[in-house]
Amino acid sequence: MEILHIDLGSHSYTIHIDSGLLTNLPSYLGSAEAWVVITDEVVDGLYGQELVENWNHNRVHKIVLPAGEETKNLQTVEEILRKMLNFGVTRRSRVLALGGGVVGDLAGFCASIYMRGISYIQVPTTLLAQVDSSVGGKTGVNLPQGKNLVGSFYQPQGVFIDIKTLGTLPRRHLISGMAEVIKYGIIYDYAFLGYLHRHFEDILSLEEKSIKKVITRCCEIKAQVVAEDEKEEGIRKILNYGHTIGHALEIATEYQHYTHGEAVLKGMYVEALMARELGSIDPAHYNEISALIQETGVGLNLDELLHKNLINSMQKDKKNRGGNISFVLPCNKGETAEVLMTKEEVSHLLQKL
């Protein structure tokens, strides 16, 4: 088992990575007055029912949500909180998020506001959640105007990653998770980017040594960045590469056409193009980035960038400053830079791509 530590003072915790962790998960978790397992319909059928049935605890409750980004809203939050109250959940109870990024964001946010905060555990079951969203304490939900506009920084008490759960994911969702994996190589670790080039198919085929190395390295990078900048006031902004365009694509298409990872892959591709157009990236490095993103098979029709709601969505992005739209653009190998642009500058640049 790989065990990583995130040093955040009183909010520090560990990340456990292994194959088959779910089998004995309750033995790792410690005690609580009651447990609330929050999951979705797909994951419940695969793992949730068995986990709860085999849990030797007299107060384990379960909340099963519809799967998908459309669930990630304030109405769902209220439904979860009402059920927790009906279960008699107290401050000495704990929440367990079992699922992908949507479940983790919702469960973490509910834990952060229920009775002014109770403990929670992340048990991510998708590649995207395992390498990114389960680590770092970002929780929240969407509003019609934009993604993750309501939320909190609230760290889990632990993250338990069972690599075996990836075996039930369709290839499309593995590709989706690769968005965040590739991102780490571009923004932080150029040597890791090279590893991804060489072992791309091994990773997608879930060859155990390769996939464990990838998950571990991504969590190491995320842990280092979060430990240095928990509240995204400095270096943590680099993790937003690809997300300004990506989030806008999701919103403009009402979450119907792309997974989050697919939108981020498209966002990274476009934002690399923007960097090339601005002359801030070496052409050879741009070609490396472009080639790896295109290897995922997630194509990009540049006409998508002309969608009338795209820039409107970007203008409501929570990362913006001073009325300008914030982009994290790649520059040197393993490095990025934040670039602020007006709405007009963004529109002009996208039309030139």
Image: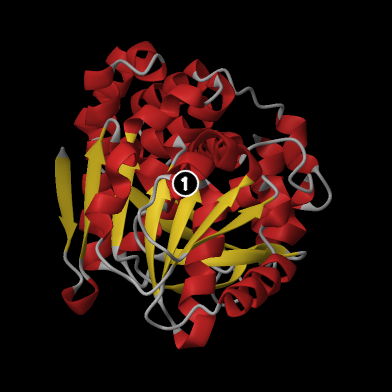
| Residue 236, picture quadrant | bottom left
Residue in the foreground of this view, choosing between 19 and 264: 19
Where, quadrant-wise, is the C terminus in this rendering? top right
- Residue 103, position in %: x, y? 55, 54
Residue situated in front as seen by the camera: 58 or 249: 58
Q: Position of residue 143 (x, y in %)?
A: 72, 67
Q: Is residue 125 visible?
A: yes
Which of these two is toward me, 323 or 349?
323
Q: Which residue is the site of mark 1? A: 53
Q: Seen in the image, is 154 located left or right of residue 353?
A: left
Q: Residue at x 31, y 52 (%)?
A: 26
Q: How many marks?
A: 1
Element type where label 1 sits in the image: helix
Q: Residues within 10 Å of mark 1 (few under 14, many from 20)?
A: few
Q: In the drawing, does residue 88 fall left or right of residue 192?
A: right
User: Is 318 left, or right, of 336 in this rendering?
Assistant: right
- Can residue 333 be seen here? The reply is no
Depth check, front residue: 352 or 105: 105
Q: Amino acid at mark 1?
A: Glu
